[in-house]
Image (tube, rainbow, N blue to C red):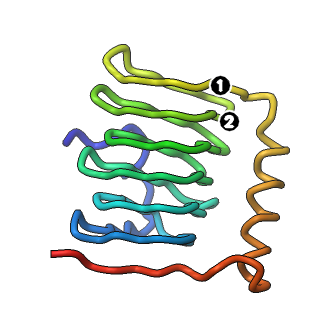
Amino acid sequence: MTAPRGCYASNTRMSTLGPSIVVKGELRATDDLTIEGTIEGAIFCEDGSVVVAASANVGGDILARDITVFGRSSGQLIATEVVDVRAAAAVTGQVVSPKFILDEAARFQGRVAPQMLEAAIRVARYQQQKVKTGVLAPVEAKGTR
């Protein structure tokens, strides 16, 4: 896998959820995050980068500084800087970001709405706050073999 543009350039830490990891529920990270497994729920990494690896399958919204997709993602992709969808990636849903890069070999079904960035971030933060107050169920992580 080629290193995503901008995702590894910073001096921040990178956390990786390997291909055997399945998460059902909300996932929050303060480090940059690489997903190689399956996530069924929202991902909040507002100050970092999220990489959806070629082996990954994400079913839920992603909120991050920048998002790079090599694998499969369905849900809203909300980035404060850039969403980058690479060749062989499959994305279904809305992209909300000031910058959107779509490789001609990628599959994209959805819409791009850069003008809705502030509203999308407020909604994502509100949903995250509902989890903190116990309105939504906590995350459940399981390793598979």
The residue under the point 57% across, 70% down is: 26
Q: Amino acid at mark 2?
A: Val
133 lies left or right of 15? right
**What is the residue that sits farthest to the top in this orientation?**
104
Residue 133 image offset from top left, x and y in percent: 79, 84
Q: Dot 2 surroundings within 10 Å: few (below 14), some, or many (20 or more)?
A: many
Residue 36 image offset from top left, x and y in percent: 29, 58
Pointer 2 or 1: first along the chain: 2
Relative vertical location of residue 141 with respect to residue 42 in this rendering, above or below? below
C-alpha span from label 2 to label 1: 6 Å
Q: Dot 1 surroundings within 10 Å: few (below 14), some, or many (20 or more)?
A: some
**What is the residue that sits farthest to the left in this orientation?**
145
Find disc 2 in the rendering and name its residue. 96
Relative vertical location of residue 10 with respect to residue 145 in this rendering, above or below? above
Do the numbered discs 2 and 1 sit on residues whose CB atoms are within 8 Å? yes
In this view, the residue in front, 134 or 7, is: 134
Task: Work out which quarter of the rendered image holds the N terminus and state it.
Answer: top left
Find disc 1 in the rendering and name its residue. 112
Name the quadrant containing residue 3: top left
Q: Amino acid at mark 1?
A: Val
The residue under the point 44% across, 56% down is: 10
Relative vertical location of residue 52 with respect to residue 45 in this rendering, above or below? above
Residue 102 image offset from top left, x and y in percent: 45, 22
Residue 127 image offset from top left, x and y in percent: 76, 65
Looking at the rendered structure, the secondary structure element under dot 2 is strand
The residue under the point 61% across, 28% down is: 99
Name the quadrant containing residue 12: bottom left
